[in-house]
Image (cartoon, coloured by chain):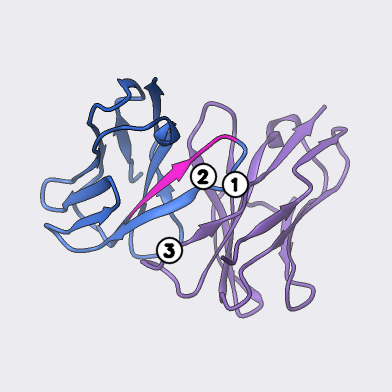
Chain colours: A purple, B blue
Amino acid sequence: EPEVTQTPSHQVTQMGQEVILRCVPISNHLYFYWYRQILGQKVEFLVSFYNNEISEKSEIFDDQFSVERPDGSNFTLKIRSTKLEDSAMYFCASSVRRAEDTQYFGPGTRLTVL
Amino acid sequence: ILNVEQSPQSLHVQEGDSTNFTCSFPSSNFYALHWYRWETAKSPEALFVMTLNGDEKKKGRISATLNTKEGYSYLYIKGSQPEDSATYLCAFNFGNEKLTFGTGTRLTIIP
């Protein structure tokens, strides 16, 4: 069964460093998403991406964040200068259509900022 | 702010017993409800997408109902098994692309 994959599973970085989190969505899906869960809090939406551009973003997704689909398979989230409060589990998801369609999630990347 | 609440936060159930838990949401602006099962170190697994008031969906021993007018959904598990131990998340589309998640219900099945 097709699945969303994410690498790495765990990333440790120093405050101020840039990180890139990678995702391979399901191949026939058109919509791509990033969510995160800070420990003990709800899963929260960061950004959605369709047709090679951001379609919606949350207020968390400031200028320090960017997303890219550099080729036909990968979808990346870059954090330019990490802060302690960026420590979280980051989930990638994809769906065929928007809104009511099922979003399929990857296993997440645990980011630890020291 | 559109808030989604789940109760209880955690639940211990004896193997073989049935159980249910609740997701509540603002009844206006409703578009779709999603239920996920999330086991530690794995991907959240999609269980159901529900859009219609009165909808009832079933997958094996798990079923869900939806009441959009009063703003709640129930998830039922019949005859709990150890593999049902997980966190169950509900999430909403309010007409746009993002999912707004509840806090989750952590279910532990006691053998």
Q: Main secondary structure of the magenta part?
A: strand
User: Which residue is nearer to you in this view: A88 or A102?
Assistant: A102
- Distance from label 2 to label 1 (Cα)? 9 Å
SS of the residue under disc 1: loop
Q: Is residue B110 visible?
A: yes
Q: Residue B34's spot in the image, x, y percent? A: 35, 54
Whether tag 2 and tag 1 are in contact, CB under 8 A, the answer is yes
Residue that label 1 marks: A60
Magenta-drawn segment: B34-40
Q: Nearer the viewer, mark 2 or mark 3?
A: 3
Q: Position of residue B65 (x, y in %)?
A: 18, 50
Same chain under badges 2 and 1? The reply is yes
Classify mark 2: residues with Cα within 10 Å, few (<14), some (14-19) or many (20+): many
Image spot of residue B90 (x, y percent): 36, 45
Q: Amino acid at mark 1?
A: Ile
Amino acid tagged 2: Glu
The quarter holding residue A111 reads top right
* Placement of B103 over or under B29, stated as above or below: above
**In the image, which disc is placed on residue A102?**
3
Give how far apart the Cα atoms at labels 1 and 3 are: 23 Å
Instruction: Read off the chain for label 3.
Output: A
Residue that carries the numbered disc 2 in the rendered image: A44
